[in-house]
Image (cartoon, helix red, strand yellow):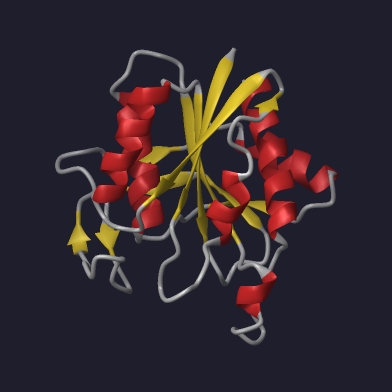
Amino acid sequence: MKTVLVTAFEPFDGEAINPAWEAVKVLHGREVAGARVVTCQLACVFDLALQQLNVALAQYQPDCTIAVGQAGARAEITIERVAININDARIPDNHGRQPIDTPVVPDGPAAYFATLPIKSMVNALREQGIPASVSHTAGTFVCNHVMYGLLHALAQCSGSAKGGFVHIPYAPQQAARHPGGPSMPITMVSQALIIMIAQAVTQQ
C-alpha cells in the first residue's frame, strides 16, 4: 500500500487556529485511492519546520508528500508550481526569526518544480465544485521554505516519490476578523485534500 504524508503548520501571525492543520489532522489513518494517509504538524519556524519534515519523511517513507499552508488573501485552493531558494520574511516566524534574502539551502538550485500532477488536481477540484487554480508563487515565508526543502530532499533520493505544496484560504471564523477577506469552510478543504490525494496517487 502506498503512503501519502500530508503536513500542515501550527497557527501563526496571531491567529488562534491554522485551518490547514484543522483540515489535515482529520485525515490521519484514512485510506484514499488505496493509499494510507499519515499527517504531521510542522512548526511555523524557519529551519525547525524542515527538521520536523525530514523526521516525518524518514519515519513514513511516503510515496507522495503534500504540504499545506494558509494564504489568507487567496479566495481558492491554490496548488503551487514552483519553490524558490530564498527566505525573505515579511513577518517574524513563531520563534521571532525574520530572515531576509537568505537561501533555504546554501548552494542549492535556484528553484524546484512540484512533482505532483498539479493540473489534474486543479481540474478534479473544479469538477467537484471546489474553487482551485495553479499558483506560480509560494511566497518567501515558511511555506516556500518547506516546499523548497521538501523538493530538495526528494531530489537527493533515487526513488520516484512525489511532492508539492497547497495553499488554502482563511476559515470563515478567521475571515470574520478580516473584513472583505475570502474564506473556505474547513470541511471543504478536507474534502479537497482527499480529491487531491486521489489524483496524486493515481495520475502520473
For the question of whether residue 80 can be seen, the reply is yes
Q: Position of residue 61 (x, y in %)?
A: 41, 20
Residue drawn at 44 percent across, 38 percent down: 113
The image quadrant where one finds the C terminus is top right
Q: Considering only vertical position in the picture, is 204 above or below 109?
A: above
Residue drawn at 33 percent across, 50 percent down: 145
Going by the picture, which residue comes out furthest to the left? 106
Residue drawn at 71 percent across, 64 percent down: 184
The image quadrant where one finds the N terminus is top right
In the image: residue 55, left or right of residue 105 = right
Q: Considering only vertical position in the picture, is 177 above or below 202?
A: below
Q: Nearer the viewer, residue 3 or 117?
A: 3
Q: Nearer the viewer, residue 168 or 86?
A: 168
In the image: residue 150, left or right of residue 69 = left
Q: Position of residue 52 (x, y in %)?
A: 31, 41
Looking at the image, how many numbered discs can be counted on the residues?
0
Res 180 → quadrant: bottom right
Residue drawn at 57 percent across, 45 percent down: 25
In the image: residue 128, left or right of residue 146 = right
For the question of whether residue 110 can be seen, the reply is no
Res 121 → quadrant: top right
Q: Considering only vertical position in the picture, is 143 above or below 181?
A: above
